Image (cartoon, grey):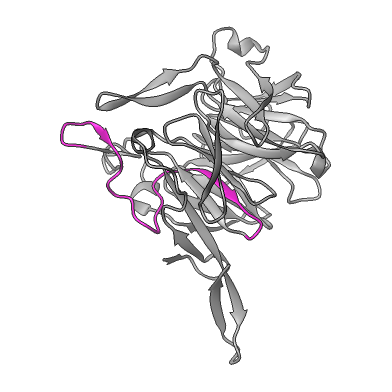
Amino acid sequence: MIIGSGEHGYEWIDGWAKIPDSLSARDGWAHPGMAVAHTGEIFTVHPGESTVLVFDPDGTLKRSFEAPAREVHQMAVASDGRDDFLWIADPGRKNVRAGGMYEPSPGEWGGQVLQLTFDGDVVSRIERPDHAVYSDGTFAPTAVSVFQLAMGGNGDIWVADGYGESYLHRYNSSGDYLGSVNGEEGRAGRFACPHAVWVDYRKSEPELLIADRTNRRVQVYDLEGQYKRHFGADVMTSPSSFAVDGEQLIVAELRARLTVFDIDDNFVCYTGENERIARVDRNSPEDVPGWPNNLDENGNVIRSRILEPGSFNSPHGVAVDNEGNIYVAEWLVGGRYTKLVKQRSSVTADGGESASIS
């Protein structure tokens, strides 16, 4: 089916990722990120296991490997100028089935960030920084982004502690801790669940984007950690991850849509919006019972019964390939992995337009 129109028209490919069927794939509460390598490979994670899955653009599983993490949350691909690496944020806990419910289960490593080769070998590990907030606080990183040497950066690593103390931490390319920000130094105010961090190269001077999720906005900093501006609070409810298509920013909102902004932070459109979910507050009496899942007659958590092509339920991870196709991974029992194939318009002989799928 086709959603949207014009330059924001896409073919919705439901069930794009061909994940081998298993009990853990069906019952695992997916909490995935997504990333695209320059090779065209798409990285995401298994719904129930700490297994990185690597797909072709058509959704065929090429290979997989285990990551030494409790939960492979958001991920990023970055180059050091010679080699490409996969970076993973692991908050240290995962919701796992316990009877009819799901409970957070801790892992042996605690919160951490991993740098891996594309074959799964561990190159480096970043653990809790030496910061006073962790004397009695929790380090639970949700995202990582690298100021890539291959893009003219200095190799700094930025880590968002979205599920812990709502801080953003900076490390050098060797993994040495450099400092932190928490929003109080800027005009927008304190972060509340900085769920994603993204180095944005669209402008001549790269910027740092922070998905300040509970505050429903994006905060923008420079690469020295200085506040610049914020945007989006009037049109977003739950910014959770970022991707870029040309000059446009795509924000995955957990409350059931993708939100698109232009290079000047202006709202452009929603894509795949599910109004039933997107426009109510969490715990509203109008909310979907058990969202992002559903509840059975006994109150047990089950996979959502209202999933349908063309409407998102809970976008959590997003990535864009070189053709402008979008890949979305959702947060729910059993997961859902969707490809949006970008339409191309061409002028016909009579001067009209016809659409084709890339």
Asked if residue 277 lies in the magenta stretch, the reply is: no
Left or right relative to 273: residue 317: right
Q: Quadrant of residue 295?
A: top left
Report the residue that reaches farthest toward the bottom: 350
The image shows residue 285 at horizontal and vertical percentages of: 26, 39
Quadrant placement of the C terminus: bottom right
Q: Is residue 300 above or below residue 292?
A: above
Using the image as rendered, state which of residue 118 and residue 214 is in the foreground: 118
Res. 62 visible in picture: yes
Give the extent of the magenta segment.
296-323
**Along the line of sight, which residue is nearer the eye, 94 or 211?**
94
Please report the residue visible at 37 percent of the width from the left and 42 percent of the height from the top. 21
Query: In which quarter of the view is residue 28 placed?
Result: top left
Q: Position of residue 185 (x, y in %)?
A: 68, 27
Magenta-colored segment: predominant secondary structure = loop
Identify the residue at horizontal 48%, vertical 57% (top origin): 271
Q: Position of residue 46 (x, y in %)?
A: 47, 36
Query: Which quadrant of the rendered structure holds the N terminus?
Result: bottom left
Closer to the camera in the image, 141 or 264: 141
Seen at 53% across and 24% down, the residue is 91
- From the top left corner, tell me how far across and down residue 255 is, in percent: 42, 44
Rendered view: 72 above or below 356: above
On the question of residue 234 being in view, the answer is no
Is 349 located above or below residue 282 in the figure? below
- Residue 24 vs residue 35: left or right? left
Where 319 falls versus 53 (above or below)? below
Q: Taking 273 as reference, is 202 left or right?
A: right
Q: How many marks?
A: 0
Residue at 63%, 60% in the rendered image: 323
From this viewpoint, which residue is outermost toward the top?
Answer: 135
The answer to which quarter of the image holds residue 196 is: top right
